Image (spheres, rainbow, N blue to C red):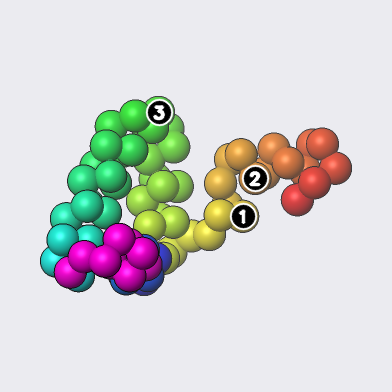
Amino acid sequence: MMMDELVKLVAEKAGITQEQAQKAVETCYEYVKGKVPPALLPQLEAMVSGEGSADDSPLSMLGGLFGRK
């Protein structure tokens, strides 16, 4: 679901077709996947597939250590 929303947003903001936006988003996602440490890939994939949320990320969990959540 998150990817669909992002594709729509990219298409609207950039003034391009849905197909072009889909390709752009997929390209960016593949790039990010290649840069993320392997231990974080499951969280990234869950978030993108809509199975997780930003609150489940290791970085947001660390926020609790500093009084933020």
Measuring 48% from the left and 60% from the top, which residue is drawn there? 52
Disc 2 marks a residue whose amino acid type is Ser
Mark 3 burial class by Cα count in 10 Å: few <14, some 14-19, many 20+: few
Q: Is residue 18 left or right of residue 42?
A: left
Q: Point out the stretch of residues depicted in magenta.
A: 9-17
Q: Residue at x 75, y 50 (%)?
A: 69
Q: Does residue 39 lie above or below 56 as drawn?
A: above
Which numbered marker is on residue 37? 3
Q: Nearer the N terminus, badge 3 or badge 1?
A: 3
Tell me how far mark 2 sits from mark 1, CA to CA.
6 Å
User: Of all residues shown, which one is farthest toward the right?
Assistant: 67
Work out whether residue 42 or residue 1 is closer to the camera in this orientation and state it: 1
Q: As rendered, which of 21 and 31 lies closer to the eye?
A: 21
Residue 36 in view in this figure: yes
**Residue 18 x %, y %:** 20, 70
Question: Which numbered marker is on residue 55?
Answer: 1
